Image (spheres, coloured by chain):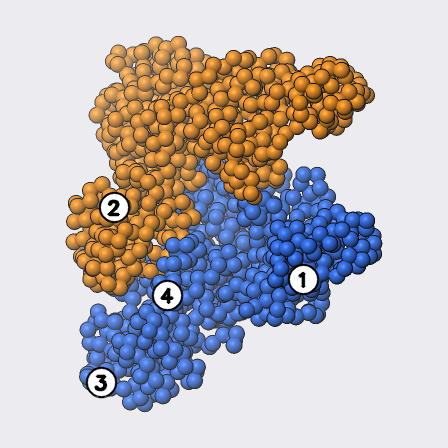
Chain colours: A orange, B blue
């Protein structure tokens, strides 16, 4: 079921019917025909309308079954109550895909939800793709297949190219499409999926991943109905090294409430979406502007191999500014090798040559200085990308004469160098730079953030895939249907790879003493009962117990349980060694309603309680991913030996997280949550001190 | 000395001489004359050049002393070695201000530094204002006084208006000026101060604060030579309720190094600059784009009274997006009162009315829906500002017909409402909205950040000034020239308002026992010596000492000191009560090279050691400011009672910080640092457990 659908009939249909076609050029049933006639769409268009013989000059048909020709796509514009029957007719006519503009389906509930379910059945039975209902449809500029009623064509046409845009929201999607047009980005296809009765975000991303024409994918998401398909699609895109730039909304309380009323989709925990995006190399944008900034750059630029940034500037101040921003966002500004500095100095004895290279405003009179500084950087600087600050040069025709000599020549000499130019400019001068594959960005700091995004996307590609296999230890235990007690839970988790110390169960005072003696160390004794959550509150935990105190401790624990939890089933007392130090961590697994088992890791104490310093990954994942997960904690220095402690074995921790994720994934249907809190991490690995598993139900 | 200079002669000179005037229109000595003739500048222009009788059609003078007319401003364009003598001549001629373009002064050192010092003397002796040297100069569009060689006028003229722009960097300043022009912002004046031998950032901000034409001030800073004058200027601007929007660079290591080579200014600790900006209500921008975004909005919009945001949208998705961003940046999206929701529902039964108000895409066909939804929000919504999402409406002439009926009428009815419109648009349609005082922002999330900036600026104004007086307790102690021991330091700090427990000094075992008995509690005993920093390392600290252990403890401490620190002067043993709990905090005071005594506050343990979770204020400051300072800590919940502790008395902590700041300011010349670490904060106030003062020298 995770196999992506073949969207060819929806993206590049060769013949299109419009059901509910209209002669009124501004009605929903009139617009797609008008636009396709204008564009023009080369294939046949079949207007379907029982009351007209001709629509906008085209022969009209009363019923789609009357057409008698192959139809790749049918656009459905009739009111909701009429939709099911025309879609059934389309399926009968062998139509390969439907785009349903009509609204009042699941998003309003009641009868609409019933109709939508029927559409789902038709799609499943016939294999006909359905996009929508309640959607703004599709557009593919290469063929001008226009399956949308968006009025954007009234004020301009987008151009064909390599950007595949998917959106769950129609209005936001239209906005993105106009943004792309105004930025001059070439569009491969644009799909607004609406209620997603069939074709969904995952299908669109998978299409982009496998489509040779697509270079970059953007996704505007409000929710996700099928996480497995989404993840499968993201893996496809990563394997194809196609950047996926996503904007996911609904993180805030008000936002999630608004999203719930807006569509029928489930918002899902934002932190988990964030984890999925990080895990599968998706660049998450936080505004439409940022999404399009990064998409535009990814469409035209190679991805930098690393984070080493060269800065060439005509202003010392701008060099300072760039250095600040670079440090803030994690780009390196390495000091240039001596040979590169010598190159700069040879051209300009007074230039700063360390990096930033400041060729000073003199370079706007002696243009070759700029070229020589830049060449020294590119030839010997060993940088992965270069930011060139040219201030307002792009408005000066006088200076542009010089620039037009230098920059095309440098591009020719360094065809693969990633070079961004920050300058204020008019459109004409911008185009001159862009024609030579320079990324032109008015604001330098914003430009640096875009370069960082490209570097991050590349890192996501480089680390994805087979180099991080899941642990091959077999999953032995299965979570039972009833709540296991702590000992049972610990046994299950220990088999799954979470280290627990040797523990014993005592059902009498004598056994308790024997257990302590057998463990041969000071112990903690805890009431053992799946029915008792807060053991300490009822005197159910005794610390630092030696053999001579064991019997009394046992009796006291049992007495407390009898008194305070008379109805609890008591399995005895758990006897475990006292913990010996290490950094207190917590591991939890939640069964996310969207993404299923999701592993959380954090540090204990104030880190989790005050700072909410935790990190997530969707199960299962390999050790390398787990290691990155640990690396995201703000409190990481504590695990690395801050405050004088010995550094914890992070690889051991990563192995635990990875193995637990495999166990959780294998038991996805059997549990609500798993808590390992605390687990103490030290230089010799980690040891868990508690185990709680809540089965499903 | 903190009195700002009167910059009238520099900003609005009525007569201008150009020393080193040139007939070559593109030379530095030719440009200002050419531009002023083009503009034109109405007052007399006096070219000074001993080799020409006429320059660009104007009568030239061999020496400025030959002019024989009052001269408000002289522009100096001669090479550095000639500058001192022509500036002396200008001073002799009674010139009121000089702008010195020439470079090679303090920024290159050597002879240049000597010349610069001489310029400082001339200015001080004559009272003549000097802007520069090594600066790009000045511009005031209202009179076209053009004291700059920037070539920006070759490609367009800025318009006069209310924005005062100050910049320490010439090239960045030119960039900002072109940005402002392209955004259509009206400029009051623009001053690039370069090496700041005389006129500095503080003068320019103070000018803007007192100048009736200035509405908003932007400052691009790389450093600060006189913190007192800067703070005085910021106070003036705040009192005048004029937004100061600053970009301060040099935060990064590479950036600070680049700044040091770029100008002669001292970067200063970035965290302290940040504190100063927060303390005095300056909005700190982190990119030029952000600086101009906020300046543009502040120029045209009132400042919101609070953080309550109304959202009106033609797209449910956009409403979700806006809600997310609002929560992230701290704007509230309150549910609308019933009467407002009823108003929305009356117009559109199917609209979401809670806030965001989603009038749906239907409003782009039935325009009045949008107007009615917006009016319901404005009339009854009790919001401080409204974001209206119109998608790509601004490109659709058809829809704009409707918009042009609605929006001017709404503005007329609600003249003071703060309304931002997020839409993609062409310039013409943008201007139509802007003509009615709508803030037009293409990207909605970026627009929300601008609205938040306006709210923050207003908050800075509202809390500034007399409502937060300094504590009036007299400062009694003075920090001595030699390092005080812990007891002496604690006495000083106690008198300054930092609570210490009763402590006793024992110089014999018998005294030690008597001290413990007198304190009547378990005690800590510590070696008392200004020469011993790490007391524990030499066995100099004994915990939990009762009377019976006192004598032995004393002897052990003294023996340890004799053995491990034989050269230390020992003042005895300090006896203090054992601490009784509370949240561990630290207070420090550093004497910042730029801003002087700067108070730091943070939580102890992992918060300071791992997370660097500390906050700063420049001394002195009042209790309210101290309270805000405490509120900035990420670990604040711990002080508020997280983890089950009783909430600490934050007002008591604030009082301590404020009083200590007054003490530190009074002793500014006498110390390097003060450390109160730890101080335990609890519900009954705080108690300090240690005291270290490092005198100056």
**Which chain contains the residue that carries disc 3?**
B
**Relative to A115, B429 lies left or right:** left
State the CA–CA distance, disc 2 to disc 4.
30 Å
State the CA–CA distance, disc 2 to disc 3.
48 Å
- Residue A438 numbered mark, or none: 2
Residue carrying label 4: B263
User: What secondary structure is found at the residue carrying circle 2?
Assistant: loop
Residue carrying label 1: B570
Rate crowding at label 3 as few (under 14), some (14 to 19) or many (20 or more) other CA atoms within 10 Å: some
Instruction: Give residue A466's position: percent from left, percent from top.
Output: 36, 23
Residue A43 at least partly seen: yes
- Residue B50 numbered mark, or none: 3
User: What secondary structure is found at the residue carrying circle 4?
Assistant: loop
State the CA–CA distance, disc 4 to disc 3.
32 Å
State the CA–CA distance, disc 1 to disc 4.
48 Å
Are the residues under badges 2 and 1 in a single subunit? no
Q: Do the residues labelled 1 and 4 touch (CB within 8 Å)?
A: no
Relative depth, front residue between B216 and A238: A238
Relative depth, front residue between A210 and B580: B580
User: What secondary structure is found at the residue carrying circle 1?
Assistant: loop
State the CA–CA distance, disc 3 to disc 1.
75 Å
User: What secondary structure is found at the residue carrying circle 3?
Assistant: loop
Q: Are marks 3 and 1 in contact (CB under 8 Å)?
A: no
């Amino acid at each position: 079921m995770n196999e992506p659908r073949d969207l060819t009939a929806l993206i590049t249909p060769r013949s299109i019917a419009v059901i509910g076609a209209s002669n009124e050029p501004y009605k929903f049933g009139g617009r797609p025909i008008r636009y396709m006639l204008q564009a023009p769409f080369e294939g046949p268009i079949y207007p379907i309308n029982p009351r007209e013989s001709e629509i906008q000059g085209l022969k009209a048909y009363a019923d789609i079954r009357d057409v008698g020709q192959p139809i790749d796509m049918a656009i459905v514009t009739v009111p909701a109550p009429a939709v099911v029957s025309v879609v059934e007719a389309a399926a009968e006519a062998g139509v390969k895909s439907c785009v349903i503009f009509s609204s009042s389906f699941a998003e309003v509930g009641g009868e609409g939800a019933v109709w939508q379910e029927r559409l789902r059945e038709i799609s499943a039975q016939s294999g006909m793709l359905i996009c929508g209902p309640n959607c703004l449809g599709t557009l593919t500029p290469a063929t001008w297949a226009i399956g949308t009623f968006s009025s954007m064509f009234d004020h301009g046409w987008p151009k064909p190219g390599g950007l595949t845009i998917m959106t769950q929201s129609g209005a936001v999607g239209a906005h993105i499409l106009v943004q792309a047009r105004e930025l001059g980005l070439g569009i491969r296809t644009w799909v607004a999926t609406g209620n997603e009765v069939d074709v969904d975000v995952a299908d669109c991303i998978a299409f982009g991943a496998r489509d040779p024409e697509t270079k970059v994918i953007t996704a505007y998401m409000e929710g996700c109905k099928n996480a497995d398909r989404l993840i499968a699609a993201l893996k496809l895109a990563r394997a194809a090294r196609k950047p996926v730039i996503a904007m996911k909304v609904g993180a805030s309380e008000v936002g999630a409430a608004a999203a719930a009323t807006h569509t029928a989709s489930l918002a899902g925990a934002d932190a988990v979406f964030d984890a999925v995006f990080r895990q599968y190399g998706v660049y998450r944008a936080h505004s439409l502007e940022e999404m399009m900034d990064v998409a535009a750059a990814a469409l035209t630029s190679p991805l930098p191999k690393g984070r080493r940034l060269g800065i060439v500037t005509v202003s010392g101040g701008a060099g300072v500014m760039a250095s600040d921003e670079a440090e803030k966002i994690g780009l390196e500004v390495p000091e240039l090798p001596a040979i590169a500095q010598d190159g700069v100095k040879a051209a300009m004895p007074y230039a700063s040559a360390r990096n930033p290279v400041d060729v000073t405003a003199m370079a706007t009179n002696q243009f070759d200085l700029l070229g020589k500084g830049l060449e020294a950087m590119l030839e010997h600087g060993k940088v992965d990308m270069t930011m060139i600050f040219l201030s307002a040069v792009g408005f000066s025709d006088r200076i542009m004469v010089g620039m037009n000599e230098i920059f095309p020549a440098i591009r020719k000499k360094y065809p693969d160098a990633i070079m961004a130019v920050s300058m204020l400019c008019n459109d004409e001068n911008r185009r001159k730079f862009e024609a030579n594959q320079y990324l032109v960005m008015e604001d330098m700091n914003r430009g640096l953030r875009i370069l960082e995004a490209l570097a991050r996307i590349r890192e996501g590609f480089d680390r994805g895939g087979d180099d991080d296999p899941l642990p091959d230890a077999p999953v032995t235990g299965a979570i039972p249907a009833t709540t296991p007690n702590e000992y049972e839970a610990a046994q299950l988790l220990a088999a799954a790879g979470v280290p627990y110390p040797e523990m014993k169960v005592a059902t009498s005072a004598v056994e308790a003493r024997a257990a302590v003696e057998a463990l041969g160390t000071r112990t903690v004794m805890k009431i053992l009962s799946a029915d008792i959550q807060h053991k300490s509150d009822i005197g159910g935990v005794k610390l630092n117990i030696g053999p001579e105190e064991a019997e009394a401790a046992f009796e006291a624990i049992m007495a407390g349980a009898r008194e305070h939890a008379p109805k609890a089933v008591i399995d005895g007392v758990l006897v475990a060694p006292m913990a010996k130090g290490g950094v207190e961590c917590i591991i939890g697994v939640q069964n996310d309603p969207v993404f299923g088992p999701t592993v959380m890791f954090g540090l204990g104490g104030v880190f989790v309680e005050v700072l909410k310093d935790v990190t997530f990954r969707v199960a299962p994942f390999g050790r390398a991913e787990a290691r990155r997960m640990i690396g995201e904690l703000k409190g990481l220095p504590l695990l690395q030996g801050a405050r004088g402690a010995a550094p914890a074995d992070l690889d051991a921790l990563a192995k635990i997280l990875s193995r637990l994720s495999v166990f959780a994934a294998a038991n996805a249907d059997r549990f609500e949550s798993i808590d390992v809190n605390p687990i103490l991490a030290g230089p010799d690995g980690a040891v868990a001190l508690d185990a709680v598993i809540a089965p499903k139900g």
